[in-house]
Every structure is written in C-alpha cells, then in structure tokens.
Amino acid sequence: MEIKRRDFVKLIGAASVATALPGCTRQRPRNLIPYVIPHEEIQPGKAVWYASVCRECPAGCGVHVRVREGRAVKVEGNPVHPVSEGKLCSRGHASLQGLYNPDRIQQPRRKREDGRWERIAWDDAQELIADKIKDLIDEGRGDNIAFINSHQTGSLDALINEFLNTVGSARRLNYEPFGYESVKKASDTVFNVEKIPQYKFNEANYIISFGSDFLETWMSPVKHAREFGAARELQNSRMVPFLHVGPRLSMTATNADEFIKVKPGREYALALGMVHVIVHENIARGIPRAQLNHVRAVVEDYFPREVERITGIQFEKVEKLARTFAAANPGLAVAGNPSLDGNNGALTTAAVHLLNYVCGNIGRTVVFEQTDLLENIDSYANMRRFVRSMKQGEVSVLFVYDSNPSFTMPEASGFNAALEKVELKVALSSYLDETSAQADLILPVNSPLESWGDYEPSDGVYGLMQPSMKPVFNTRMAGDILLSLKALLNNDENDASFYDYVRERWREIHQRLAPNTDFEEFWVGSLANGGRFTDAQTMTVQLNDRFAKQTLEELKDREPVEQNGFELMTYPSMNHYDGRGANRPWLQEIPDPMTQMTWENWVEIHPDDANRLGIRNGDKIEVRSSYGVIELPAYVYEGIQPGVVAIPVGQGHSEYGRYAENIGASPILLLSASLADVTGSVKWSGLDVSVVNKQERLRIANVAGSDVQGERPFLQVVTVEELIRNSTREEKEEYPQIYEPHEYPEHRWGMTIDLNKCIGCSACVTACYSENNIPVVGKEDVRRGRELSWIQIQRFFDAREDSDNGRFLPMLCQHCTAAPCEPVCPVFAAYHTNEGLNAQVYNRCIGTRYCSNNCPYKVRRFNWWDYDFPSPLNWQLNPDVTVRTKGVMEKCTFCVQRITDARQEARLEGRDIRDGDVVPACQQTCPTDAIVFGDLKDPDSRVNQLRERNKARGYHVLNELNTQPAVMYLKDVVEETTS
Amino acid sequence: MPSSYNLSYTKTDADLLNTLKSPSKGYWVALAILSIGLLIGAYGWGSQIYYGMGMSGKNNPVGWALYITTFVFWVGIAHSGTLISAILFLFRVRWRAPVYRSAEAVTVFALCVAGLFPLIHLGRPWVFYWMLPIPQMGEMFPNFKSPLVWDLFAVFTYLTVSSTFFVLGMMPDVAILRDKFRGWKKKVYGVLALGWRGTDQQWRHYTAAYLFLAALATPLVISVHSIVSWDFAMSVVPGWHDTIFAPYFVAGAIHSGLAMVIILLVPMRKWFSLKEYITDHHLASLAKLMIFTAFVVGFAYAIEFFMAWYGGDIYKRDVFLFRAFGPYWWSFWGLFFFNFILPMLFWWHKYRTNTVWLIVVSIGVSIGMWLERFVIIVTSLSHEYNPFAWGSHFLTSTEVYIIIGSFSLFFFLFMVFAKILPVVSNWEVKEVIEPPKKK
C-alpha cells in the first residue's frame, strides 16, 4: 500500500501520542482546560492526528481525527483503512458535531417522580442500577435484564454479552432500523447461507443496480462510492456502464447512464428475465450444465415478453441487456435497499443473486466472506418478539445504548407503550432522544471520538478506536460503565477499565495475526494504523439444490392493496440516515443532493398526481395510512412513479436537541406494525396511503434557484461516441485583455473537477464547512438564500439530452485570472495573489457586496449576521482559519491555510512544494476523486495531467466572459448501456 | 415675460420676509411627523448596524436592492436643481428666477440624503472612510479601478459644487435678511452673507463668479449620473453591462428631477403665496419638458429591449424576459406606465395647467423612476448567469423604516430651509421686474 509523506507524518503523530494517552483517560477531567503543564507531545499550533473508526453508521470507515491543542477539529478518512481509504462522507464529518453537540447530556440524570430530571452522581447512579440488578438476581429474575444496542462488534460486543452473562440473561438486541433482512433471506434461499455479501464495484465491467442506493446509505456508501469512482475512470474514452432499475430517481440512480423507471417491487422481473435469456442462450459462465437446467426451470416463466408485461421494459431491451451483462465478465448486479423491504425486497435480491450466479460474478464481484458481521443485526421480527416480552412484563431492566428505537420502531409496533412496563430503563446515551427521554436514568456516554473500542466492518478488517481527546463533558465510555457495573455486581473492588479490556482482546488478535512479534509493538502499530487489516477469508457458495420456482414465488410480498390511490415508499435520508444525523446542524443545512431541500423532509410526488390534486412545490399535504397521519411539504418530482409517494426517514424528532426538534415529520409514524411477509423486516414500502392537499403554502428552504439550466452550458455532458469522434479541446482560450496580465513567479494554483466522477454526495461540502469554520445559518436564512456554503453541489435536471437524470456541478470560487470581483472592490479587499488566488481580506472588507454582484458564478458569501457557534460547538473551529464577523464577504480560499502549511513544511525541509503536498479539504474527502488540486505552472502536476489526458472534455464555465478561471471542469460522460 | 410680473422691489422684500415669519400650526405638525419618520429611519439603521446587514432583505444573488435603488433615486432627484439653476441660467431662461432656489435646495438635500445610502448599505459602515484616499502608514489606498470609488468622488464633487452654488447664490438675499433682522439672527445671516454690501464692484465679481459656477455645475449633471450608472455598466451583470447606461441614467435623473421640482413648487407657491412668482405658465413649461424627458427614457427602454434581442446574448435576453414576465413584472410594467404613459397627459393643456394633475403625474413619475432603478438593480441580480443561484429579494421592515427615514430627512431639511432661508431668489426676481422709479 502506498503511503504518502503526509500520511506518514500523521501516523507518526498518532503513534507517539497514542502511547502517552492511556495515562490521561483515566483521570476523567470535567473540563477542557488548556494545559497548565505543557504536554510533551502536543505543541501549540501543531496538529496531531489520531486514527480511529467512524461510528456514525454500520459501515465503519477508518478515520483520522485532527486535534489541535487537545481539541478535535476535523475528521478525515484513514488512508490505510480498507473501507474508507482516506475518504469520508458527510455524516462522518459531522461526527464532530455529535461530539460537540450543545444538546449533549453533560452528566448523569435521574427522572424524578414528577417527571423532571435531576442530577445524580456517577457512583450513585451505578449503585442504583447494581442494587436493582442484585434484587432481580436474588429473585431469580436475572433474565429480565435486557440490552438494546446499535450494531456492535469486537470488544464492546463481547463485553455486553459478558455483562448479560454475569446477570444471567440472554436478552440482547443488536438493533439497526435498516437491518438487511431481505439480503440475508435471499442469500439463504439461493445459496443456503444467511449472509450479506461484499460487492466489488471496481472489479466489475458492468454495473446494474436493482433499486439499490449503494452510493448513499446502503451498507458502505463511502467504499462503494470509492470503488464506483474507480470503475467509472475513462479508459480510451470508454468506461464501465452503469444501469439503474428502480422506482425512484435517487442520487445513485441519477448517476446511471440509463435509469429505467419501474413500479416499486417490479425490479425482480428484469433480473429474472435476464437470467432467462442468459440460460436459454447458453451464455452463462462458470456453472455446470446440470445447474443450468436447474436455473432454466426456476426462471422458465420469465421470458422477456412476460418481463415486458410486468415491468414495461421492452423485451428486446431485456434481451440486449442480458447479453451485454453476460458478456461483461464480470459484471455486477446489486439489489437491496430498505425501501425495497416489504416490496419484494427478498425476491429482488434473490433474483439478482441468481443473475450474478449465472454470469459467474459470485466470488469475483460478489464475495461472501467467512465472518459476515452485519448478519448479527437483529431483524425487526426479533424486535417485535422483544416488544411482546416487554408488554408481558418480562423485562425489568432495559439498557439502551446508542440506539433510538422509540423513534425508529413503527409507532404501531407498540414499543413505546411496552417501554412503560419496564421498571428501570437505563439510557446509555449522549443525547436526550425519544428513547432516553423515556428513561428513568441516563448515563451519558462518550462520543466515539472520545472512546476506546474496536469495530470490524467486514472479515479481516479490525478497526481500532482511540480517544482523540478527553471527554468534553462528565461522560464515560459505555464499556467502562458496564465494567463498573460488573465489578459492583461481583463485589469486585478492582475497577478495570475498558481500555484494558480492549487491549486484552487485541492480545487475541495479536496471537492470530502476528504471534511472533512483540505485543506492545503490535498494539502501538495498530493504534497508529487505525487497526489491522488483513485479507478477507472468502467462501465459495453453490446454488441451493432445493431452490425452485416455488421458493421464488414464496419470496413475493403481498401486492399492496390500492384503496387510497398512493403507494408509500420510505427511504433512509442521505444526511440523517435513520434519524441519528438530525441533530447535526451541518447535516440539516447541507442540501439533499436530489431535492436540494434543507432543514426539512418532504413528500415526493409525481407531477401528474400533483396536477390532479392541485399541489405545487411546498404545499402542505397530508399523508394518511391506516396507522397514522403526517403533514409535510410536497416536492413535485419527475423522478418518481405516478401513484407513488416517497418520504425520507430521519426527520420529525420530538426530542433530540434544538437542531432536530420540530422539523418535518417522520414517515415511520405511517408504517404498519406487521412484518414484511418473508423477511421479517419493517415494511418500509408498499403501504397504501391517501394524499390530501391541505391548501397551505409552507416555508420550505430549497437551495436550488432553478432545477434546469436551459440554454446555459454550465454543466456539459458528452456521450462516449462524441468523445471518440473528437479528442481536441473546443474552447477558445485566448481573449484580449485591457489590464496587464498577472505574473505568477512560483505557483499558479488550480483545480480540475471531473464531472463524470462527481456523484453528488456532498461530502466535500461538509468537509469544507468543517475545515473553514463556515457557520450554519438555519432554515429561515437558507430559505432567503443566505447559506454560506463555499462549495455547492449544483444540480440540473436537463444537462443530458437523452434523459432527465439530474447531474451535479460542484461550484466554488473559480479563482479567475481576470476575476470580475477584484477590480470592483473599492478597498482592495478582493485582490489577486502572486500564486493566482483570489484572496479576500476579511479585515479590509467593508461590505459593499459589489464583488458578489459582479461574480458570474455567484460563489461569494456575505456575513449577514454575526453567526453563533453555541458552546461547545465553537471548539470544533479550525484555529488556522479566521472566524468571520458580520458585514464581510467570504468565499472559497482553495484552503489557503493548507497551502501555507505545505509551504512552511517544504521550507523546513529545504525544498519546493511538491505536487500533492497541498490537498484542499474538498479534494481530500471526495470518495470518487473527482476533485484534483495542484500547481498549473507545473506541467507534470496531476491537475495538468488530467487536463492533458482529457482534452476533449475540459471546459471552463462561462469561458466567453474571459474570466479565465483556475477551475477547469471535465465534461460528464454518458456510456452506452447496451452494445 | 416681465409683463407677467406685477411686482415692486418693496413688495418682493416684504414677501421674502413673510416667508420667514413664525410658522403656522400646520407647519409644526408636519415637522413633528417628519421627525417621527426620521426617528423611525434612525431606529432602522441603528438596528441594522447592531444586528447586521441581514436586517435588510438582501441575499446571495441580490447583493444590492432597495438602498442602492433609493440612492440612485435621490441622486436623480438632485439633478433637477442643477438643471434648473445652472443650465437654465446659462440658457438665460427667464422664468427660472423664482423657482431655482428651491430647486437648488432639492439638489443639496437630495444629495445629502443620497450620500447616506452608500453608508447604509455597507456591511461595516463604521469603516466607510477606508474608501477615502487617506494617506497612512499601512499604505492602504482605495482601488481606483472600482466604479464605487469613482462614484464616491463624483457624488462628493457634486455635493461640494452644488452647495457652493447654493450658498453663494443666496448671498444678496441673505444680506437683505441681515439688514431686516436684529439680534442673533442678524449675526447668523451676517456670517452667511459673507460681507455682502451690494456695491457695483461686488456685483460685478459676483455675477462673474456665478456664471463660472453655473458653467462648472452644468457638466456635473452629466458626469455624476453617468458615473453612478457606471457602478452598473462597468460590471459583467447582464442587464447592467450596457453602453447606453450613462445617457439613459442622465435622462432618467432629469425626468425624476423635474417631477420632484413640481411636487415641491406647487404646495410652496400656495403656502407662501408665491403665485405671482411661480405662475401657471412656469409649471406648464416644466410639464412640457417632462414630456420630452419621458420620450427620452421611453426610447432608452425600447433600445435596451431591442439590444437584448439583437445582441443575441442569452443571459441578457433572459434577464429582459424575466423583467417583463417574471415575478417582478409589476415593477417593470409599473415603471413603463408611470414614466412614459402617464406624462403623456401633459400633451393636453388642461392637465398641465391643473395643479392636481401636475402633482399626480409628478408623484407617478417619482414612483416610476424609483421602480426603474429597482428593476435595473434587483431583477438583473436575481436572474444572473448561474441559474442555480437565482433568487429573489424580499422586503423587510428595516428597509421600509430606512426609506421612510430618508424621505422624512429630505422633507425635514426642506421645511427647515423654507423657514430660515429665502426660498425664492429675490435678487434674480428683481432683475426681471421693473426697477423702482426715482421719486
């Protein structure tokens, strides 16, 4: 693995501090106070990086936490971690706002009789629990103690089990609202293994997604996006085609070369039809003849014309797709998405498994591993059973850790009602969410960035977590709490720490991976590395002998009854996932890539339906099911099927802090309590709902000034055909100039942005907020067009001629050579540096806003107010970047602080800045490497090489204005999906 | 024209003194109302300084809106004064004599009010002086490439010249007041009269200087508003970037200036009983001039649209379509109606001699000219190059307060002026009436 110099420096920093840390963590200080006695390892003004694991979703990306003067200020991907490889998504960046959330619970609390909270000391709280548990054990009711936690692996997983063992209970739920039940069920049916495979997008020559939003929320979005980006690299003007079949134009779908819209739950037919063609035309690969006949029998009903009847896709198209896909060798078909659950999710995934199987993709692009850690997630069926136990009074003490079932369980499931029956509810939670609000006792836990721990996202990937800073508040690690409780129960004076526990467990890993080395070295190395990463042990799977036509039919969910005219589809929100991101202000403010909505959730409705009901964008509409009713603004959206309404999950919190409360409504309130027929998951989709226009305009904060660009060639797209025909640059480059041209003695910084690679995920936007201290302005100001995002992912639906897929244009300051903003500033606050930056001197700016008026790209941002960073969010601020005051203009600086940093480092080492030394925050995090920054004066720099290699695709936005931008865009490319 | 005056030197002197008598109750009520308006404006500006520019209704695409609109509006109003006092003086238009003083006052006060707006619209008004060329250690200096700096210089030059013109033009009249009053008033007027004795030598120098100042002020009418227009024309904003802007703005300024003069003259001649000085004929002449300026601005509108189509630039074309048919259609069609259609009433003698109609049309033109600047500034910015960044201005109470304040300030200054200084130029009226016969 290639390790760059910067990475090496980070590792060294992480390693050296990691050795010194254990001594600090046990003291558990109450405040963050700058050092009275200076720390040897931490120099003021110098950042230290700690390797850890992001725990914002089950993907488990490795991260590096940047710490300045003892405070975590930025999170970046860990370049050596096989999941993230240095990249991170928006939610990962926002983990900092979980750490510094002003609504965090700051010390243990107990609920009084009158329902108000009172403080309680840690020891008292733990004793209270221990006494209760002891009583239960004495009564022989130890099994009445239960534990609900988010998906855990490794030490904490083992410790929870150990703890439950101590009290004699086995009631443990690894609860994730989106639990991949349909994938497990499908694997079980087709291959007789109840596992979730790993997908290798970068090894596929053709990608089809059957309704799977793998770039957004499904399984491991950063990894998928990274590999997807690699797959979409142009080779001789061609690239891996990507086809999406599904009911909704999601962000993943919009990235497809072709998006085939089908009714929800009908995707499976195309997969089976393709299998039908492949096995009948004898173009299957790597399966024995006997199995071929077996498969033929299974799919015999799904001849292409039948597929056309079910899905509306022309049968010739089905045949062509089947042939192209089979020829890809290997291709990759993926299925599975929470929004499919309840709507033939298992059937679709099974059909896709079969498709991959007959094309010989299993083991190549679809890999089953020996240990599949996601399979431990408990299904909704288990949760239902647990609710029943609670209702029957079989649960006396309930621990809930890092999980919010009160919000994510369908209201109709009766979870909240059953919770009242529990005598002692202990929330091990950082936040007062819907679940902890109902607890009797809240023991605030450390944020993952303050904790020891480990996490294995997949086989062979052992991520190691270490605290990047001392806890912000009077909180403890969940592991420490459990160990203390255990000690109390065992009357054990010895208060072991979770740190020791993790270390002990890593002795086992040490024995397994490197038994002949010194453990200390192994441990320190692992800390510096962010874990140990070995190759996964894969397993081969064979077609289940008993798999038959009938089993396939049995996977079908019941057809939704259509009485009220609309079918409900819910999907995890890109920014909030199952709702856990909703209290991070960045995630509220950064727009959803497709709808560009902020601080809101919405109901997507097709224009035909909307016209019929007289609904316009932003009208309040009521969605009613037999289980509940919610009111939300409408988002009239071409990307959805008529007769279907889609609502993202994640908003509508009644608790969970100032940023999450009273925003939108949760579609979970509409869901039925019953399980999806075959998989035992929540029926996230396929529910029958009615839609009523409430005749009221709502104040929505949509960032998009226009959904279309019309004749304005801002976002340019070419087809591969055009690319092959023409390989020269079309743009006129030289224009006359009145002013003296600028001179750049050393560097001229510039950027190349490959639109073909930009998937719209907006991780760059969040990284920029984090790096550059960009304030969050709130809904009202976003609505008024005052958001301060320095980089914006602009989305247009008409960029492509052949389809209405939305495409993305990352728009940031273009750092023009002949910048219109510079000459108009009366006080030289906007000026040109000798390295080509359009600098903005905040101290000099008097706020005429003329520069912003004159910027044709509209990338300058004005400080309309003095913005608030409610404590302790202010501790996240990057000390290298000025916090701007009211009345001044700001904008993208190309991360000038990083340029300065690189220059100083280079000077110390007595050399020039090398290509790759300066990596702005947006480029650093971009999962697909769409953004490349560098010196335009250096002909060998990556930024120039990219331009050189992609001559025909390069263009400047508004080139005709002769602004001579430093940012060059490479046109988006559309590949053919059938050959 | 002298025939239309039936006046004597004694009567003019007496009339002049009459205007300065203790004001009526109505005057005090009006002044009180204007003071409240001023306080409202001060509150608006104060809160905007305290809380930030967010108090106004601007946002990312629309960085300039009502303040700059009102700034240009007042600069435009200012032009009426110079037009009447200097240009008509150079052209020896005789009916100018009784009205030019108030016109000049309009210029000076409108400029004072206008000059506040660039400060009001600053994000950090407390450091406005950074725009001034103040030599200091840090060697920070204004950027002379910026039209805003040109603008600052243009407006300050204009204010200086017109104030000088205003004060010097009053000298002989103030001297009369000095002679008629006693006590502290005599001292104050004495200072303002600058030792005027009315000797032949003084008159000789005075008229020469006056002619010189008139000649100096005349090109300023053209230059100031041209430069104000370059704030827009020098930018790349479609809808601003037009070569026609300088003459277009000058014509518009004169158009609105004429309207403002009528609005002020009609009540003044009633309240101060100046019917004999400002006759119906004078007002009708102003109205005729207004027909001409209406045609000039109407032509400019037509040319702009023609160029938007003929130029073939999609950005510019879209801005003009947006103006006419976008959410701001009312402002566009409003300006067209008020500035061009409405003044056409003055083709009829009936309307241009009826003071009510004169006022109605003039107020209409004032509104129309304000709308014209609003349309130019706000619609162009809301519908610029980048479609994703399109957005609209919204109205806030702070903006309304500040605009109320600005109008209040203007009228407040004018009313105070009317009670302490001669609103009609006595000495120039005397020039056009028969000198008294020796007894």
Image (cartoon, helix red, strand yellow):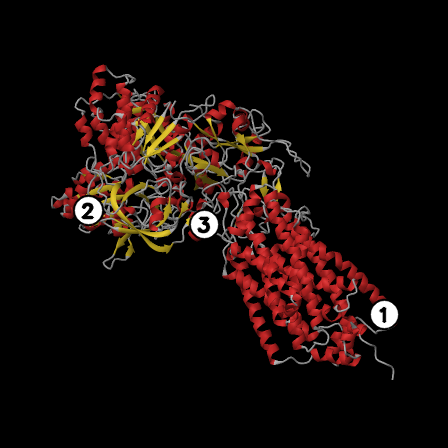
Callout 3–callout 2 Cβ contact below 8 Å: no
Mark 1 on the same chain as mark 3: no
> Is A648 located above or below residue B372 in the figure?
above
Residue A361 figure quarter: top left
Q: Nearer the viewer, mark 2 or mark 1?
A: 1
Which mark is on residue A397? 2
Marked residue chain, label 1: B
- Residue A152: horizontal and vertical position, in percent? 28, 36
Q: Secondary structure at mark 3?
A: helix
Residue assigned mark 3: A782
Dot 2, crowdedness within 10 Å: few (<14), some or many (≥20)?
A: many
Give the amino acid at mark 3.
Answer: Val
Mark 3 on the same chain as mark 2: yes
- Residue A373: horizontal and vertical position, in percent? 27, 31
> Is A549 located above or below residue A584 in the figure?
above
Res A516 seen here: yes
Q: Secondary structure at mark 2?
A: strand
Q: Nearer the viewer, residue B281 or A727?
A: B281
Which mark is on residue B202? 1
Q: Measure how far apart labels 2 and 1 are at the Cα level.
A: 105 Å
Give the amino acid at mark 1.
Answer: Gln
Give the amino acid at mark 2.
Answer: Val
Q: Quadrant of the N terminus of chain B?
A: bottom right
- Residue A348: horizontal and vertical position, in percent? 26, 31
> Is A145 located above or below residue B426 in the figure?
above
Q: Earlier in the sequence, mark 3 or mark 2?
A: 2
Q: Residue at x 69, y 78 (%)?
A: B20
Q: Quadrant of the C terminus of chain B?
A: bottom right
Mark 2 on the same chain as mark 1: no
Callout 2–callout 1 Cβ contact below 8 Å: no
